[in-house]
Image (tube, coloured by chain):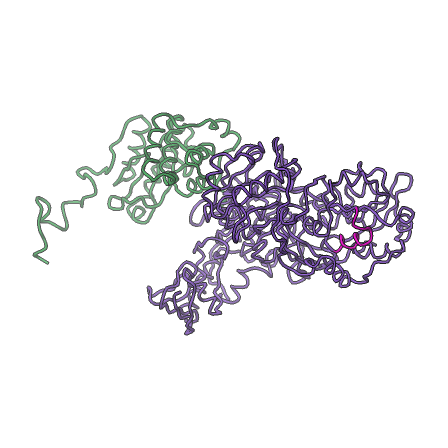
Amino acid sequence: MPKVTVDGLELEVPAGATVLQACEMAGKEIPRFCYHERLSIAGNCRMCLVEVAPGPPKPQASCALPATEGQIIRTDTPMVKNAREGVMEFLLINHPLDCPICDQGGECDLQDQSVAYGRGTSRFEENKRAVTEKYMGPLVKTAMTRCIQCTRCVRFAEEVAGIEEVGAIGRGENMQITTYLEHAMQSELSGNVVDLCPVGALTAKPYAFEARPWELKKTPSIDVMDAVGTNIRLDSRGRAVLRALPRINDDVNEEWASDKTRHAVDGLTHRRLDKPYIRKDGKLVPASWAEAFDAIKPHWTGKAAVVAGDQVDCETMFAARELAGVSMLEGRQTGLAYDTSSLSAVNFNTTIAGIENADVILLVGSDLRREAPLVNTRIQKAVRKRGAKVFAIGPVTDLTYKVEWLGDDLSALAKAPKALADALKAAERPAIIVGGGALRYEGLHGAALAFAKKYKLVRDGWNGFNILHFAAARMGGLMLGYAHEGGIKKLATAKAGLAFFLGADEVDYGLFADSFKVYVGHHGDNGAHHADVILPGAAYSEKSGTYVNLEGRVQRGERAVFPPGDAREDWAIFRALSDVLGQRLPFDSLDALRAEMAKAVPALGVEGLVDYGWSEPSLSADVSGKIADYPIKDFYLTNAICRASETMQKCSAELVHGTHFLEAAE
Amino acid sequence: MADAIQIPDEAETRAKWGSFAFSPEYKAKADMYIGRYPAGRQQSAVMALLDLAQRQVGEETQTQGWLPVPVIEYVSSYLGMPYMRTYEVATFYTMYNLAPVGRYHVQVCGTTPCMLRGSDDIIAACKKRGLVKGATTPDGMFTLNEVECMGNCASAPMVQINDDNYEDLDYGSMTAILDDLAAGKQPKIGTQLPGRHTVEPFGGATTLHAMVDKNHDYRGEW
């Protein structure tokens, strides 16, 4: 723990800290462009210069200088001020003066810091350098003349996204940041380089020229595109959500968000259900709320089946359950029927942050990169920084890090190949990750549990047994009892007269041919096509909701905008319907509902990680067969919001199906 | 305008160079370079391997060689590194040609010492013979480039043609060299001044006189 003095303030800093970190601990602001907490240190922008004694009599780059015992650091001397002004002047030499037409305006590090640390006027009278635009894919817009070559994007692509496709070519004045041969970045995290870029060189293509940051209302929310529960901030203006940005949460998403999280928001304004519909003579016709409720009433028998979709919040599921009863609930739309007697056995027990510490990881039928990109980055970190070994059972796919593929035969689980068995025996923190989709294989769940027992994956202070879900509603649904014995197929055989579908678009509606189908959701997708009555609900941005992510973390998001047209918040729909059906639900407000929900399932009342305890159900460990494929075929089109989003359609066409879009100039 | 590096048409070079592989002699050399670094650090040999690949391309095309994209990718795969990282190296160093060059790659030094000693005349001599900066002559013989200091300031002005230096040039000697090369003759390598061998001073030593004939210990005289 070295002791340093920053501007006369003596303080102790952790061993291994840099001078920049020491200054921050002392409460000093150090301007920087290339330095970023979550990336490796580059030290090439020179903006963080400070005076350090002992040392050479010149300013030093604090981000790359380790803090050592007895250092005297000054950040307020004329030398430092001059140095900063000088560096800023050099950075601005080739930076265009196009702030008025730059999308970064208002949230630009260069703009802010030149106001705070710059000279104020320019002495440069020569020609500025200009750089041709680069193509980086459908999400990243480039204006490379603005680039100050901090290389944050290069380091992000290599260290976090795991794709070494971005680099700096050329040298000196001709140095340029580009992707390899200007192909699109093949990453589901490419949008993050936009946030990282301290200037306006990389901006979001779908958001180009949409808004200025100060016009936007910022609402903290939780993402529902996958089960990670990315903490996001929804930026809205008027009734439209214009963009989604990640909030920092080191336990969940660190500082990142997947491209789907960021750019599916334009789907929130397309193909929306904005009034109730009733099917008359085989056709859906618009109706009023009263008519829609009246159409449901004759089919009401005191209970109903409820199928929850992948994106619903706990409040909706709870309200539906209170009305329809607990006997016919199901959330696993695609027909999975795994055992849910112990929630710990279907949870991501190691936790998202914890998986970074695993030293041997076995993936079973999980295409992590598409199912949970931000869990994948954690494993990428474990591999890259801590030398973790990753084995996988399933069809070979590119996960961005080195994986030892054990074939797609599930018998490898019963009889582990030698390499895996040896690695597990030597491991201190071994983990298994079973893909949520792979649970469709008979006996796999039991075999995985037996595997965990055999290799002691659950030990003191470490639980290495993980199921990786990829539906935001899954863990919350399981906690609320949305799991019917035998799955949705068995549920269909119960021949419910009335069935509610909460934004469920992946269901095989043929199973429910005999039921009266009420779709409560927000997009005119598969579910709405099959419904007898449509009740328009709210999307995740339009309601305050509780979500439980794949590791069992209860998180709350807030409402950013109101639902369009006649659409209402889902819980309120059930409350109103209950009145018509003569079975009034005991809550009139969201708070009252939450209080009821916390009474029924106490864990949902507290934000944070739920402790399910560890208990293993006794399941048959007999497993055979092969993992044929992964559940997510098209990362960009996994739910109704994505499918309604033009941006996601474009990403899918270009990045998944390889369509080549000509640019305007071509 | 700092344009993106103009690489020749990708489809065409892929068709032509897609099946590039080191010949046995070059493979042996490549493995020799890789062997100089510890196991797992074979990427350190990237610069040597790119040079070898460029030379092999040169032999196959009867020119000084260049690095088509598939060749860069071949070297990347050979060393197990991402394409982008190799590409960065290839674009950084001027010794790697990213577009085809002629049989003789004439690199005229235009940095201050050479310029003061008459590099403008050298360039004029090249122009007179039809060489154009940054381009190859129509007969495919010469590619002219102006480069920065090549460390021969004591015998400025100089040019580097392929692997050889020609120093102490003037308009006439440069023309003679180009004529010789065009005629298939090998001009004298090194200094072009009669009586000069390397970069020793004109007209005998100007310092360390006592060292001219034999070793001399100056220490006592300090």
Of B91 and A185, nearer the camera is A185
- Whether residue A559 sits left or right of residue A295 in the image: it is left
Q: Position of residue A231 (x, y in %)?
A: 63, 56
Chain B, chosen colour in render? green
Looking at the rendered image, the quarter that the C terminus of chain A falls into is top right
For image coordinates 41% across by 58% down, the residue present is: A64
Of A528 and A355, nearer the camera is A355
Q: Main structural element of the magenta stretch: helix, strand or loop?
A: helix
Of A272 and A409, nearer the camera is A409
Q: Position of residue A278 (x, y in %)?
A: 88, 45
- Asked if the magenta segment contains residue A321, the reply would be yes
Chain A, chosen colour in render? purple
Q: Position of residue A319 (x, y in %)?
A: 79, 55
- Which region is colored magenta? A315-327
Residue B178 visible in image: yes
Residue at the far bottom: name it.
A8
- Asked if the magenta segment contains residue B46, the reply would be no
- Whether residue A155 sits left or right of residue A65 in the image: it is right
- Whether residue A172 sits left or right of residue A289 in the image: it is left
